[in-house]
């Protein structure tokens, strides 16, 4: 099995050292960066499989890193956020982050999240590998999505979320179900992050995201994919 590379981006030396040591123990190759600027350089040269990213950093913060990096890569990103940074956390998810862990956290919790995201990205697709619904084609083997014949770039979480909805057009999925099936986790209080991912997804697959047709909201319940 190929060793996975994790890029840890944090301006605190003690945090970088702690996570490097813990992730090494769990078999990961770890590279680090002190801020977003260094992280851009490291990501381009080290080709990480996943990025653990602090939000509050000098030079270039985590949000600006995501803005720039998402233009060139869909590598999954897990945010490290303080409890007081809820607004920044939402912005991070809107920009394309896949998950977040709130400080203070245990390295064990973060390692579990990393493993979940990497397994999700590297899953062998279940049959059928290609699904079609509502004018969307999703190819699990190639991990590509096209809408009305045009390719669209999705983050790993957006891809999995769309895959869940497309698996049963017309079925209403609760937020908890989507979180569980798309991200492999069900943590109380995190269900509303699905709303952010749905908003991002609509901006990419809907002709008019402000009046969505393909991904429909069922108020008080959750979301479903149109059968039309």
Image (tube, rainbow, N blue to C red):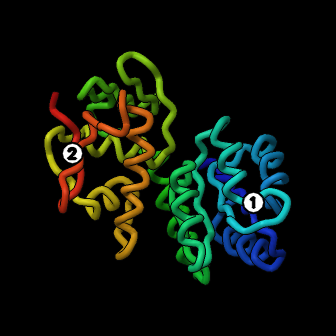
**Residue at 66% across, 52% down:** 3
Helix, strand or loop for disc 2: strand
Q: Earlier in the sequence, mark 2 or mark 1?
A: 1
Q: Indicate the position of residue 13 as horizontal and vertical percent values.
A: 84, 75
Q: Are marks 2 and 1 in contact (CB under 8 Å)?
A: no
Residue in the picture at 23% in, 43% down? 216
Q: Is residue 192 above or below residue 171?
A: below
In the picture, the quarter occupied by the C terminus is: top left
Q: Position of residue 84 (x, y in %)?
A: 58, 79
Is residue 1 or residue 35 the one in the foreground? 35
Task: Return the x and y of residue 134 as percentages of the image width and height.
Answer: 24, 28
Which percent across, then down, holds residue 77?
Answer: 60, 54
Q: Is residue 18 above or below residue 52?
A: below
* Position of residue 155 in the picture relative to residue 195 (left or right): right
Q: Is residue 67 left or right of residue 213?
A: right
Label 2, label 1: how many angstroms apart (C-alpha)?
Answer: 35 Å
Front residue (pair 34, 205) = 205
- Seen as rendered, the residue at the extreme front is 210
Badge number at residue 98: none
State the image quarter where residue 138 is shown. top left
> What crowding class fits label 1: few (fewer than 14 Cα within 10 Å), some (14-19), or many (20 or more)?
many
Q: Relative to residue 31, is residue 159 drawn left or right? A: left
Question: Which mark, by number, is residue 61?
Answer: 1
| 110, 95: nearer the viewer | 95
Q: Residue shown at 51%/52% (left/top)?
A: 94
Q: How many marks?
A: 2
Of 178 and 23, which appears nearest the observer? 178
- Disc 2 marks which residue? 224
Binning the other alpha carbons within 10 Å of mark 2 as few (below 14), some (14 to 19) or many (20 upward) gives many
Q: Residue at x 37, y 37 (%)?
A: 209
What secondary structure is found at the residue carrying circle 1? loop
Quarter assignment of residue 25: bottom right
């Amino acid at each position: 099995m190929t060793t996975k590379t994790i890029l840890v981006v944090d301006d605190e030396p003690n945090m970088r050292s702690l996570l490097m040591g813990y992730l090494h123990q769990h078999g990961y190759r770890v590279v680090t960066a002190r801020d977003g600027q260094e992280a851009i350089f490291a990501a381009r040269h080290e080709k990480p499989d996943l990025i653990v990213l602090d939000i509050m950093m000098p030079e270039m913060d985590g949000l600006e890193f995501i803005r720039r990096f998402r233009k060139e890569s869909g590598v999954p990103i897990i945010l490290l956020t303080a409890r007081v940074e809820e607004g920044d956390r939402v912005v991070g998810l809107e920009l394309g982050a896949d998950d977040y862990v709130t400080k203070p956290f245990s390295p064990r919790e973060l390692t579990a999240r990393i493993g979940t995201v990497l397994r999700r990205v590297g899953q062998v697709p279940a049959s059928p590998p290609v699904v079609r619904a509502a004018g969307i084609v999703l190819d699990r083997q190639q991990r590509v999505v096209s809408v009305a014949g045009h390719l669209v770039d999705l983050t790993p979480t957006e891809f999995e979320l769309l895959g869940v909805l497309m698996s049963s057009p017309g079925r209403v999925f609760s937020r908890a179900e989507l979180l569980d099936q798309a991200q492999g986790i069900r943590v109380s209080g995190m269900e509303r992050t699905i709303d952010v991912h749905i908003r991002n997804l609509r901006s990419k697959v809907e002709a008019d995201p402000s009046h969505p047709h393909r991904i429909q909201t069922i108020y008080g319940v959750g979301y479903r994919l149109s059968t039309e």
